[in-house]
Image (tube, grey):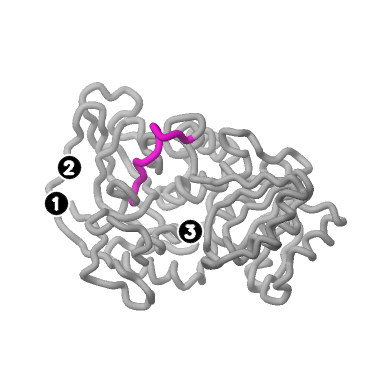
Amino acid sequence: MKAYHLTPETRIEGIPGTALGLVLRTHDDPQPGPGQVCMRVYATALNFVDLVFLSGAVPGLSGLVPLIDGAGEIVAVGAGVTKVAVGDRVVANPHQSWLAGELSPESSGVYLGGTVNGMLAEYAVLPEHGVVRMPAHLSFEEAAALPCAGMSAWSSVTGGARRLGVIPGDTVLIQGTGGVSLFALQFAKLLGARVIATTSTAAKAERMKAMGAEAVINYVDTPEWGAKVLELTGGRGVDLVVEVGGANTLPQSIQCTRPGGRIAMLGIVAGMGAVDFGRLTPIMEKALVLFGNSTGSRADLVNMVRAIELHQLRPVVDKVFPFDQAADAYRHFASRAHVGKVVIAV
């Protein structure tokens, strides 16, 4: 089989500031052991963390097969496997050992593309509990969008194991048109919530309105968009912010969240930086809940897949690249010109 590996010996041209690149290697076809399955990977997808990994900010990744997301078909099973069978169409669970409930020291530490080999390969051997049957109505390319971005959005909107989720009539703020944000828009509408969004262009705003966003704010024209969100909510503020930006957007998110509201902390796509503590004091004044989001458990993935299948939802896929153009997929993703998920067909 063929698999891409992260390596310091190459760089992907067109992505500045990287310490790692990709190298394509050939391996013997893998065989599953007891309790394991062999998955023929048909599609994988990129997430912002994959660019962080290229930057060298996380040590010890050299030689690893990258990418969290994977959808494919079970082609072989080891002894004792009962949860899935040959021919099943599945997605991989990002946290391979997180099965249910809250994340714990015992269930953390085995993360696809981060601590163990990921999905940018033709085959992957995983424990049988590391995969979940994918929605029947989706293609492999669509299903590959689900594990990381889909579950990050699902856990944000439903509140994860602590059940801090939205209820019908709530207002949710999403940021941008990346995979997580568009999934959050879909899930929030599914749960009966109102959605306010921020974006950078009129074309993207129209796309989000077509998906159900009641209001869209251009953050280029309105950099202090927190005040605009308060205006749109009659001064009340939103019930939940799906915070993907980081230090550069968090002060605005805090400003526009209602007293007692929640902020799901997800990413740093707007860049790293420092936040003056004075901008954080409303967290205490308004008794806000900020909760970290690390995708979810296998049980969360099962529940999300069930909801997607029941309501026949489809993820937004921006572009699909062939396996031999993986570097081009990274470049396109890094350009931030995409709307939705960037997928690699294996």
Q: Position of residue 100 (x, y in %)?
A: 47, 29
**Quarter of the image with the C terminus in it:** bottom left
Badge 1 amino acid = His
Marks 1 and 2, how far apart at CA: 8 Å
Q: Which residue is mark 3?
A: 341
The mark nearer the N terminus, 2 or 3, is: 2
Task: Name above or below for residue 187 compared with residue 26.
Answer: above
Q: Residues within 10 Å of mark 1 (few under 14, many from 20)?
A: few
SS for tag 2?
loop
Cβ–Cβ below 8 Å for labels 2 and 3? no
Q: Is residue 81 left or right of residue 313?
A: left
> Toward the viewer: 276 or 228?
276
Cβ–Cβ below 8 Å for labels 1 and 2? yes
Q: Which residue is mark 1?
A: 27
Q: Which residues are magenta?
A: 103-113
> Toward the viewer: 313 or 339?
339
> Toward the viewer: 105 or 53?
105
Q: Which residue is mark 2?
A: 30
> Toward the viewer: 204 or 274?
274
Helix, strand or loop for the magenta stretch, by majority: loop
Is 108 in the magenta? Answer: yes
The mark nearer the N terminus, 3 or 1, is: 1
Marks 3 and 1, how far apart at CA: 29 Å
SS for tag 1?
loop
Is 153 in the magenta? Answer: no
Question: What residue do we see at 73% from left, 70% from top?
Answer: 224
